[in-house]
Image: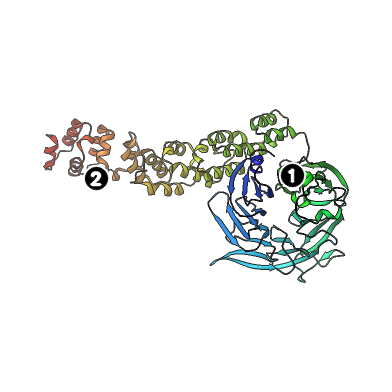
Amino acid sequence: MGGSIPSLLSGDSASCIAVAERMIALGTHGGTVHILDFLGNQVKEFAAHSAAVNDLSFDTEGEYIGSCSDDGSVVLNSLFTDEKLKFEYHRPMKAIALDPDYARKSSRRFVTGGLAGYLYFNTKKWLGYKDQVLHAGEGPIHAVKWKTSLIAWANDMGVKIYDAANDQRITFIERPRGSPHPEILLPHLVWQDDTLLVIGWGTYVKIAAIRRNMNKGANGTYKHVTSSNMNQVDIVASFQTSYYISGIAPFGDVLVVLAYISGEEDGEKEFSSTLPSRQGNAQRPEVRIVSWNNDELATDALPVHGFEHYKAKDYSLVHAPFSGSSYAGGQWAAGDEPVYYIVSPKDVVIAKPRDAEDHIAWLLHHGYHEKALASIEAGQGRSDLLDEVGSRYLDHLIVERKYAEAASLCPKLLRGSATAWERWVFHFAHLRQLPVLVPYMPTEHPRLRDTAYEVALVALATNPSSHKDLVSTVKSWPHVIYSVLPVISAIEPQLNTSSMTDALKEALAELYVTNGQYEKAFSLYADLMKPDIFDFIERHNLQDSIQEKVVQLMTADCRQAVNLLIQNRDLITPSEVVSQFLHAKISVIQDISCIYICILCLKQTHMPAGIFMICR
């Protein structure tokens, strides 16, 4: 993997990695957490710790990243705001897992553990954050993973699973006998889906299946609680390998294993030290595809720099989020192909299934997004791959801050997907770049949710440079696709302030008309001195509203204003007309002769003295 990674690791070493739907987090021995795009380009950097980062965890939405370190701290950073939390535990912390719904729930839960042997369950309460000890007394916590409500962790004794929804510990799976000490060769846990936990420890693999509402099963069933509605666990696969496991992940209905093969003379000495071997006789790490029965299906050696000197625990393997349920007949459903990341101290290697679309993937990897898009349009890949390429292309443009270019490509890349459009509308809104996307937003085929259009209009209303675009958008968008009230509510506080431009007044008037508030609309149109204001008055019977707008009406069209005043002098008397003339600046009244005609037409037996002052 290229991008920023070579330079980042030239003076530091990678220690752990986590992958979310849209980004990668890389932890280092220097205590830094780097946020990368899928090309390896650095997007953000958090100087989170003063010692090695041992574990990283994203929430499902990819909005938060949690890290833990040998410095005894746990740090939670928001990726899109300045929010940061730090918790001190005063002993090296080895594992962390955020609640998958961390961003969506106010409880802000996470679990963490380390050398002290305590597994902490941290929750936000009314008076602050509180730690609950879920487990202790069986040695350090080496790994923890959280899926739905199920939390799995490994300590010196083995693996335990806890159901946060029922506040119950479900099972205990004993550590394989004869396996190296966990601090020398870490256990590896990964949830294949909501019910399958894959465990790789030493040279052993176990797969645990969680069952609900089942009575005690046959051999291999683990049952910690007696209640029949609690989860239970079966070991559905178990085997031993001929190599040490440095990482493990699901691959459809088989497994991807990162195999560490020690040098011929290493033997048991391999795990006697955590330091890199000076003899340099380790072999290249290998990615092996194996079945649940340990049938080896494929093997690839990895191009890792300095592999001769690394130990098994210097490597790690993670996979990008995917459902894992769409693998059938050796084929992956569109958009569900797995991607794996193998980390060594100085490299990040990407592994993925080989297929006819590797060329497109290579183009994307090297940043040739336009060529990748052209290849798909030329029929060189699945047509529905356009969604993935389009999303990554847009991501790339956003990272490069080419917002206008990204917006212009959205109709082509998002096409008729309302879900995709809405996702990008809110993403542009989060970046405060929504005004550049508004001209491209579809109003039908697909029609988006009301909220998307309302957010767009508010974005235009709160940006003075976009007020003219707001007017044209309000006039062109069908009124049925959004509610005008949220937009009106966003604009009204700007009345009588410096941010209230004429264009914003016109847009607000249009919204008032849509909402049936004709009197308010008339007031704004009159202030803007719109020539068609007289037709508007007649169309909506607003003669009762002209009393306070005589000067504006005269300025807009003196002749039509005179006729209107004559026809409605029972509503506004000559005295009131003259009074408004007297209080107006003469420069506002453009045609003095027209004023005189108006006075003559309105003249009655008893004329106010002020009339003669104006006639002079």
Q: Quadrant of the N terminus?
A: top right
Residue toward you, 136 or 398: 136
Task: Tell me if residue 255 can be seen.
Answer: no
Residue 25 at x, y percent in the picture: 65, 48
Quadrant in the rendering for residue 143: bottom right
Residue 481 at x, y percent in the picture: 52, 43
Specify whether 37 is left or right of 484: right
Helix, strand or loop under label 1? loop
Q: Which mark is residue 571?
A: 2
Residue occupied by mark 1: 338
Residue at position x 70%, y 37% in the image? 385
Q: Is residue 595 above or below residue 293?
A: above
Q: Is residue 387 above or below residue 240?
A: above
Labels 1 and 2 touching (C-beta < 8 A): no
Task: Kindly report the distance in space between the C-alpha atoms of the residues bearing marks 1 and 2.
Answer: 76 Å
Residue at position x 61%, y 55% in the image? 50
Q: Is residue 293 above or below residue 504?
A: below
Q: Nearer the viewer, mark 1 or mark 2?
A: 1
Q: Which mark is residue 178?
A: none
Helix, strand or loop under label 2? loop
Q: Amino acid at mark 1?
A: Pro
Residue 388 at x, y percent in the picture: 67, 39
- Which one is earlier in the sequence, the residue at label 1 or at label 2? 1
Report the number of numbered marks.
Answer: 2
Quadrant in the rendering for residue 597: top left
Q: Amino acid at mark 2?
A: Leu
Local packing at callout 2 (Cα closer than 10 Å; few below 14, some 14-19, many 20+) is: some
Task: Tell me if residue 2 can be seen.
Answer: yes
